[in-house]
Image: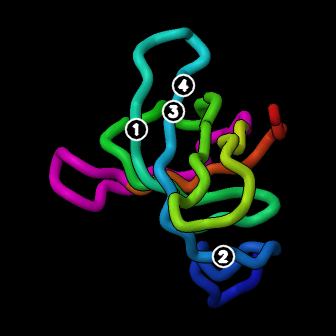
Amino acid sequence: MKAGMSDHNQRDALRIPVKCKVKIRPLDFGPAYYGHCTDLSVTGLTVETNYVPRPDEKFDLFVMPPLDGAGPREPLAVRVKVVRCHQIEQGAAYELGLFILKVIR
């Protein structure tokens, strides 16, 4: 880690701002949760959701393609690990920093 830099600025990969819906599927086959991806890189992403994960929890995440894009219509499916979780709205919304462990499809 570099001294004097915030955690947000210590990332090695360039983050691209996006606005895509996501589906969170816990590995224990519990209920699905939903949210929005706010940025994406080759190594990770940031998601806003009402789901509160455990520290270092792993789960499958499906990032839906933008509705206005001309690209693929299939969601990006990845297995991720929680790196950070910050409350952004009292009891209602959380920002998750996620590390991509594996691309499923």
In this rendering, position of residue 21 left or right of residue 58: left
Q: Amino acid at mark 2?
A: Ile
Give the quadrant of residue 15: bottom right
Q: Amino acid at mark 4?
A: Arg
Give the quadrant of residue 103: top right
Report if the CB atoms under discs 3 and 4 are less than 8 Å apart: yes
Which stretch appears magenta?
A: 78-94
According to the image, label 2 marks what residue? 16
Q: Which residue sits furthest front? A: 70
Q: Earlier in the sequence, mark 1 or mark 2?
A: 2
**Going 66% across and 42% down the picture, which residue do you hit?**
75
Q: Nearer the viewer, residue 67 or 75?
A: 67
The CA distance from mark 4 to mark 2 is 23 Å
According to the image, label 4 marks what residue? 25
Is 37 included in the stretch rendered in magenta? no
Report if the CB atoms under discs 4 and 1 are less than 8 Å apart: no
According to the image, label 3 marks what residue? 24
Q: Amino acid at mark 1?
A: Tyr
**Going 44% across and 54% down the picture, which residue do you hit?**
36
Residue 93 point in image, percent of width and height: 27, 51
Label 1 neighbour load within 10 Å: few <14, some 14-19, many 20+: some
In this rendering, position of residue 84 left or right of residue 88: right
Secondary structure found at label 2:
strand
**Going 71% across and 57% down the picture, which residue do you hit?**
44
Label 4 neighbour load within 10 Å: few <14, some 14-19, many 20+: some
Question: What's the magenta bit mostly, secondary-structure-wise?
Answer: strand
Q: Earlier in the sequence, mark 2 or mark 3?
A: 2
According to the image, label 1 marks what residue? 34
Report if residue 38 is visible in the image.
no
Label 2 neighbour load within 10 Å: few <14, some 14-19, many 20+: few
Q: Earlier in the sequence, mark 4 or mark 2?
A: 2
